[in-house]
Image (spheres, rainbow, N blue to C red):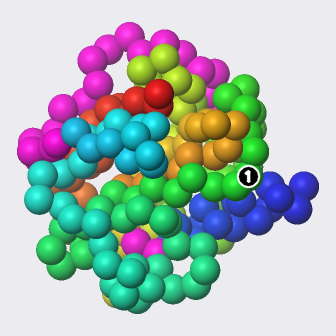
Amino acid sequence: MKKVIALIAMCVFVLIGCAEKEPSAQTSPPPKGSKQLEQRQILDNKVNVLVPTGFEIMSEEMAATKYPGENRPTLIFSDEDASINVAFNHLPTSIKEDELDEFIAATKKQFEQIHPNATWYDDGVTTINNKTVGYLELLTPAVDTNVYNLMFVTELDGRILLGTFNCTEEQMKEWQLSAKEIMHSLQVK
């Protein structure tokens, strides 16, 4: 139980830094945003995912500033001014695909307690490229603006793979569909 609470706290931290549903087969085409995306292989070539063209891996110094504390993501792609981020973290916490719905429900409950004024757009569990993926989509308050977050979670090598997309509320309309396209591009080998 302590591991689950620690993991939820870590997920909350990642989203701050920048109704349970049954898994279902993807029946409609994935969303298509207006942004140019390119395929990247990450995590020792175990995962393929689309990332916005021109995004670079964030420097350690910038990552330490943007995500203070020890639980920052291990891989962060960012635009030039670090206002839009796509981040990944392969956590040590074990999980099975059939536990993702419970994990997403617990994480949502935690967010609702921490951010009672958050705006929720969607949450649930779906199938993406034959892999069960849980997700949360919300707008959370930050120091000087609101932050749009799309968090997605799946299993890789028996452990949690956490992906996040975040940008400011002002950038949300321009990026929301592309964020969903990124999530739907996830391929775990």
Establish if 115 lies above or below 29.
below
Q: Nearer the viewer, residue 94 or 118?
A: 94
Q: Which residues are magenta?
A: 17-38
Where is residue 166? Give x, y as percent: 35, 62
Please tell me whether mark 1 sits on a helix, a strand or a loop.
strand
Residue shown at 48% from the left, 17% from the top: 130
Q: Is residue 10 visible?
A: yes
Left or right side of 14 for 143:
left
Residue shown at 48% from the left, 65% from the top: 74
Whether the magenta-drawn stretch holds residue 51 is answered as no
Residue shown at 25% from the left, 75% from the top: 82
Where is residue 15? Give x, y as percent: 50, 65
Q: Residue 133's quadrant in the figure?
A: top right
Q: Which residue is mark 1?
A: 93
Dot 1 surroundings within 10 Å: few (below 14), some, or many (20 or more)? few
Left or right side of 89 for 181:
left
